[in-house]
Amino acid sequence: MAKTWKTKLIHSDAHAPEGFRSLASATYRGSTVLFPNAAAVQDTWDQHAVGYTYGLYGTPTTLELAARICELENGYRTFITPGGQAAISLINFAFLKSGDHLLIPESIYYPNRKFSTELLQRFGIEVTFYQPTIGAQINSLFQKNTRLVWTESPGSISMEVQDIPAIAEAAHKIGALAVLDNTWSAGVYFDAFAHGVDITVQALTKYVGGHSDFLLGSVTVRDEACYQKLGSTHQLLGFAASPDDCSLALRGLTTLAVRLAAIEKSALALAQWLASRPEIELVLHPALPACPGHEFFKRDFTGSTGVFSIVFRKHFTKEQIHAFVDNLQLFKIGYSWAGVTSLAVAYDFGPRPGRPAYDHRIVRLNIGLEDTPDLQADLAQALAKL
Ligand SMILES: Cc1ncc(COP(=O)(O)O)c(C=O)c1O
């Protein structure tokens, strides 16, 4: 039919040449997905079952990232979420209802803990926090209504490595699901499903992205039943992820192995060096014997990454430790780790019940891709000023 230039702006007859093939994954943006005819219209979230129906459930870019994370984690299916914290909340909303009980390690990523104390408890869901080193003794904390057992290994900041197979086995005996935040291992150095986990979370923001420039999360499941529950909840929560961010994550995947290899080597060298320093009481790096749960790291992990913590000796004041962090030049101060830039953050555990007595003396380091001798010199000059 005849068209004015204004209509042609929307319904154009012009085409670029066909046949482009590139090494980069294409970035498909789109909210509206076109149907071939009126009868084909349907709003179903499961794009694997029915094909594409709506941008909210993923474009080929989002679903390519999901498939590739799933392949790396040896899972059944993966959902992509707008961030790691969204992945955590998706799981809680999908599997918990009023009257249920869940277990969370004291060492969990803090916003995950806050989600249960500030939000789930409002909906009548009970939470018990447990010591991350509990292992099979977790049995003693089970209730008739326990549905989920969260784990994170190593734990955030205090770095305890958990006995995941023992916890997962105990959870299964009472019909509860074992969930793991597997961000530290980048989903590759700990094979969660082979160790009994039912559902994994990753903040793709961290190692998969690797460049500190977007936020994304993933939830990977071991079976169809978990996939169905999560899919219908993902739809209702409206957790759409940006295809542009997913394309950055796909690019991040291609260099993940070399980044991790360099980061592992550098972090290990620096952790060992720090362990020899007189100012430091403890180096909490899973690959070092002083780290709680080191035996499970040796048994279950195939590598280590670049986040670990140091605990200063007891006589150092909070002001001195803040001065140490402030005096670092290459290490920047900021939360979101696993990028190319080294970071340092001082924490104060205070007299919080259930947490180790590190008080104000703990500093978490993220080792980036700077040259290791330069990072060591930076740490040395800041220690010398103490
Ligand atoms: C262990 C862990 N899980 C989850 C998250 C949340 O990820 P995001 O920042 O993408 O929401 C973080 C972020 O720091 C984290 O450290």
Image (cartoon, grey):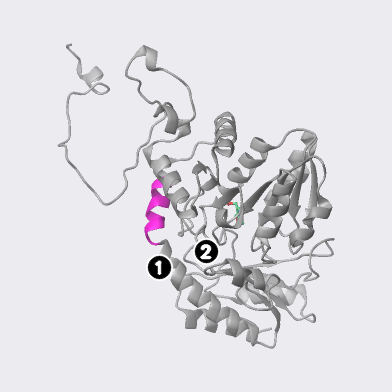
Q: Horizontal and vertical percent for residue 222?
A: 55, 45
Specify the quadrant that holds the N terminus.
Answer: top left
> Looking at the picture, does residue 375 appear above or below residue 58?
below
Kindly report the distance in space between the C-alpha atoms of the residues bearing marks 2 and 1.
14 Å
Q: Is residue 79 left or right of residue 360?
A: left
Relative side of 10 to 287, left or right? left
Residue 50, above or below 243 = above
Give the x, y percent position of residue 369.
45, 71
Residue 38, how many percent across, how many down?
37, 12
Residues 9 and 302: in front is: 302
Residue 189, which numbered label? Answer: 2
Instruction: State whether residue 112 is above or below residue 314.
Output: above
Q: Mark 1 belongs to which amino acid?
A: Val
- Whether the magenta-drawn stretch holds residue 233 is answered as no
Helix, strand or loop for the magenta stretch, by majority: helix
Of the 4 image quadrants, the one containing the C terminus is: bottom right
Tell me the residue at 45%/59% (across/down): 211
Please give the residue where the numbered disc 1 appears in the rendered image: 258
Looking at the rendering, which quadrant does residue 101 occupy?
Answer: top right
**SS class, disc 1:** helix
Q: Which residues are magenta?
A: 246-255
Q: Residue at x 55, y 41 (%)?
A: 223
Residue 312 horizontal/vertical position (percent):
72, 78
